[in-house]
């Protein structure tokens, strides 16, 4: 099944919306800004480890919903770190 440009654009928009939703959820759950880049790194690293755990599984055993979810968490926490400490 081929995905056309319009469908791909819609998938991109959906992914961006999911990242934004996760970022807002994290800010509501943990409203205090991150204290340091080291703290940001630790959070990103933890989320990436969960993403990596799913990648390391045999393809037939991977949970692609979990893979997507953890990938979104990584992206959201990278954005949060930049927003809180860099920008």
Image (tube, grey):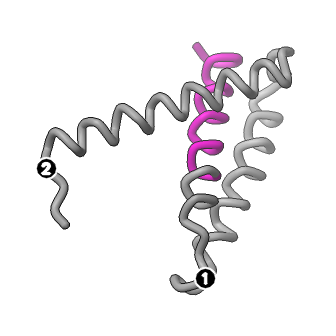
Q: Quadrant of the N terminus?
A: bottom left
Residue corresponding to mark 1? 61
| Residue 42 located left or right of residue 16 | right
Measured Cα–Cα span from mark 2 to mark 1: 29 Å
Q: Residue tagged by mark 2?
A: 4
Of mark 2 and mark 1, the one earlier in the sequence is 2
Residues rendered magenta in the picture:
70-87
Image point 53% across, 85% down: which residue?
60
- Under circle 1, the secondary element is helix
Dividing the picture into quadrants, the one containing residue 52 is bottom right
Note whether 37 is above or below 56 in the view shown: above
From the image, which quarter does the C terminus lie in? top right
Number of on-image labels: 2
Dividing the picture into quadrants, the one containing residue 27 is top right
Circle 2 — which element? loop
Provide residue 63's location: percent of width, then percent of height: 60, 69
Q: Nearer the viewer, residue 23 or 43?
A: 23
Residue 21 screen position, x and y as percent: 60, 27
Q: Would you identify the image quadrant in which residue 34 lies?
A: top right
Pick the residue in front: 27 or 86.
Answer: 27
Q: Is 29 situated above or below 11? A: above
Residue appearing at x 80%, y 44% in the figure: 42
For this view, does 37 lie left or right of residue 67? Answer: right
Asked if 18 appears above or below 53 in the picture, the reply is: above
Inspect the magenta stretch and tell me whether residue 23 lies in it: no
């Amino acid at each position: 099944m081929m995905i056309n440009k319009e469908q791909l654009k819609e998938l991109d928009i959906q992914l961006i919306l999911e990242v934004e939703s996760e970022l807002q959820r994290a800010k509501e759950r943990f409203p205090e800004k991150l204290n340091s880049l080291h703290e940001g790194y630790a959070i990103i690293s933890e989320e990436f480890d969960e993403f990596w755990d799913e990648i390391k599984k045999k393809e037939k055993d991977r949970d692609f919903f979990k893979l997507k979810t953890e990938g979104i968490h990584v992206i959201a926490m990278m954005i949060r770190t930049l927003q809180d400490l860099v920008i």
